Image: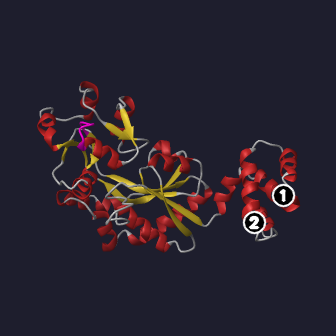
C-alpha cells in the first residue's frame, strides 16, 4: 500500500478521482485476473503507465476497495431510527444514547474525518462484512459477527428486554403467565410477532428465534411498533425504553403498550462500537477503546448511558455499572 500511495502522488491532481475510481473498479471487478490481463484491460482504457502501475500495485495487495479501506482516514458512522438509542429525525434528532456516544468519539478522533449515513440495519451488517470503513455504535458482540467485525469496549447497555403488547391485550398475555418466549413460539403460533432482520439481542433469545422463526421480519423499529399499534402484530420482544419512547413521542399515547417480563429475559446486554474486521478497523477500535477508558468513569458519560431510561429501570442500570466499566 505504501507503493500505491507513492504512485498516486505522481497522478495529476485534477485527474486523481476519475483515474483512481476507474482503477479501483477494474481491480475489484476482475480480482482473479493475471497481471497481464489486467494490464491489457487498463491500457485499452487509456490509463497510461502511471495508472497501470497503480492498478498492478492494488491488484498485488488484494482487491482495490479493501486496500483503500486499510489506509483511509475517513470513518463512516451508519445510523437508523431506533429511538431512544438513535434518532434520525424530529425534535430529538441526534440526541439518542448512541448519537451522543458517536458525537463524543467523533470529537476525540480528530485525525479522522467523519460522516454519518442513514441506512437500514441489514445494510450496516453487509457493509461491515464487506470490509468497508464503517463503524456502527450499538453493535452486540456475537461469535458469528466476530468472524468479520471487531468490537470496542461496551459503550452502553440494553435493558430490560420485555414482551411488548398493546394495552388492550394485556389481560390475554397475563393469562399465559409465567410468560416464556419458547412457549409463545411453540404453543401459541397463532400469536403474531416479528423480528428485526439480522438482529442480536441475547444468546437464549436469538437461539429461540433461529429455531422457531416468526412469520415476518422488519427493518425499522417504528415499522414494527406501528404494526403492533394497528393490530397487525400481537407482541414484540423489545427493550422497554424503545417501546416507551415510541409510545409517548411518536404515537402520542404513553399508555399504548405495556411490557411484560418473560423467562428468557437476559441480564443487561452491552452495546459496543462494531467496525469492519480489517487492519483499519482494528486500528480505529484501539483508538476508540482509549477514548472510552478515559471517558466512561466520569459523570458526564454515566448521564449518556442513563439517558431516556425509565425511572423503574435506573436502579438495575446503576447496579451493573461497575461491571459495565470493567468489561472488555
Query: Measuring 47% from the left and 53% from the top, which residue is drawn there?
Result: 119
Q: Quadrant of the N terminus?
A: bottom right
The secondary structure that dominates the magenta segment is loop
Distance of label 1 from label 2 (alpha carbons): 11 Å
Instruction: Name the residue beneath numbered marker 2.
Output: 16
Residue 165 in magenta stretch: no
Label 1: how many Cα within 10 Å (few below 14, some 14–19, many 20+): some
Image: 38 above or below 1 = above
Q: Residue furthest top?
A: 187
Give the percent coordinates (x, y) of residue 322: 30, 62
Q: Could you say where residue 273 lies in the image, as x and y percent from the top left? A: 45, 58
Q: Residues within 10 Å of mark 2 (few under 14, many from 20)?
A: some
Judging depth in this view, the residue of 105 and 154 nearest the camera is 105
> Viewer-proximal residue, 204 or 98?
98
Q: Residue 47 shows which numbered tag? A: 1
Q: Nearer the viewer, residue 300 or 323?
A: 300
Whether 162 is drawn above or below 326: the answer is: above
Q: Does the rendering let one see residue 215?
A: yes
Q: Position of residue 191 (x, y in %)?
A: 24, 30
Q: Is residue 231 magenta?
A: yes
- Local secondary structure at mark 1: loop
Residue 266 is at least partly visible in this image: no
Residue numbers of the magenta segment: 229-235
Amino acid at each position: 500500500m505504501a507503493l500505491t500511495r507513492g504512485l498516486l502522488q505522481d497522478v495529476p491532481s485534477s485527474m486523481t478521482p476519475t483515474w483512481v475510481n476507474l482503477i479501483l473498479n477494474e481491480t475489484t471487478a476482475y480480482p482473479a485476473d493475471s497481471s497481464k490481463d489486467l494490464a491489457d484491460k487498463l491500457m485499452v482504457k487509456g490509463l497510461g503507465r502511471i495508472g497501470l502501475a497503480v492498478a498492478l500495485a492494488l491488484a498485488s495487495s488484494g482487491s482495490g476497495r479493501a486496500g483503500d479501506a486499510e489506509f483511509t482516514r475517513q470513518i463512516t458512522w451508519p445510523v437508523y431510527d431506533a429511538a431512544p438509542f438513535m434518532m434520525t429525525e424530529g425534535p430529538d434528532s441526534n440526541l439518542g444514547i448512541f448519537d451522543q456516544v458517536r458525537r463524543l468519539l467523533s470529537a476525540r478522533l480528530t485525525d479522522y474525518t467523519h460522516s454519518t449515513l442513514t441506512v437500514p440495519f441489514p445494510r450496516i451488517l453487509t457493509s461491515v462484512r464487506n470490509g468497508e470503513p464503517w463503524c456502527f455504535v450499538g453493535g452486540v458482540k456475537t461469535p458469528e459477527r466476530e468472524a468479520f467485525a471487531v468490537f470496542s469496549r461496551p459503550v452502553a447497555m440494553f435493558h430490560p428486554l420485555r414482551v411488548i403488547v398493546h394495552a388492550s391485550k394485556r389481560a390475554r398475555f397475563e393469562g399465559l403467565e409465567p410468560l416464556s418466549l419458547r412457549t409463545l413460539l411453540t404453543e401459541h403460533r397463532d400469536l403474531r410477532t416479528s423480528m428485526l432482520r439480522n438482529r442480536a439481542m441475547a444468546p437464549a433469545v436469538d437461539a429461540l428465534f433461529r429455531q422457531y422463526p416468526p412469520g415476518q421480519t422488519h427493518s425499522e423499529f417504528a415499522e414494527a411498533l406501528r404494526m403492533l399499534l394497528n393490530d397487525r402484530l400481537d407482541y414484540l420482544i423489545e427493550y422497554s425504553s424503545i417501546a416507551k419512547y415510541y409510545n409517548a413521542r411518536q404515537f402520542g399515547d404513553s399508555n399504548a403498550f405495556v411490557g411484560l417480563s418473560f423467562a428468557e429475559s437476559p441480564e443487561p446486554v452491552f452495546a459496543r462500537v462494531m467496525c469492519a474486521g480489517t487492519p483499519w478497523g482494528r486500528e480505529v477500535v484501539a483508538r476508540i477503546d482509549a477514548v472510552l477508558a478515559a471517558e466512561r468513569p466520569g459523570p458526564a458519560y454515566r448521564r449518556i448511558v442513563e439517558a431516556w431510561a425509565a425511572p423503574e429501570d435506573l436502579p438495575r442500570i446503576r447496579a451493573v455499572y461497575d461491571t459495565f466499566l470493567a468489561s472488555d
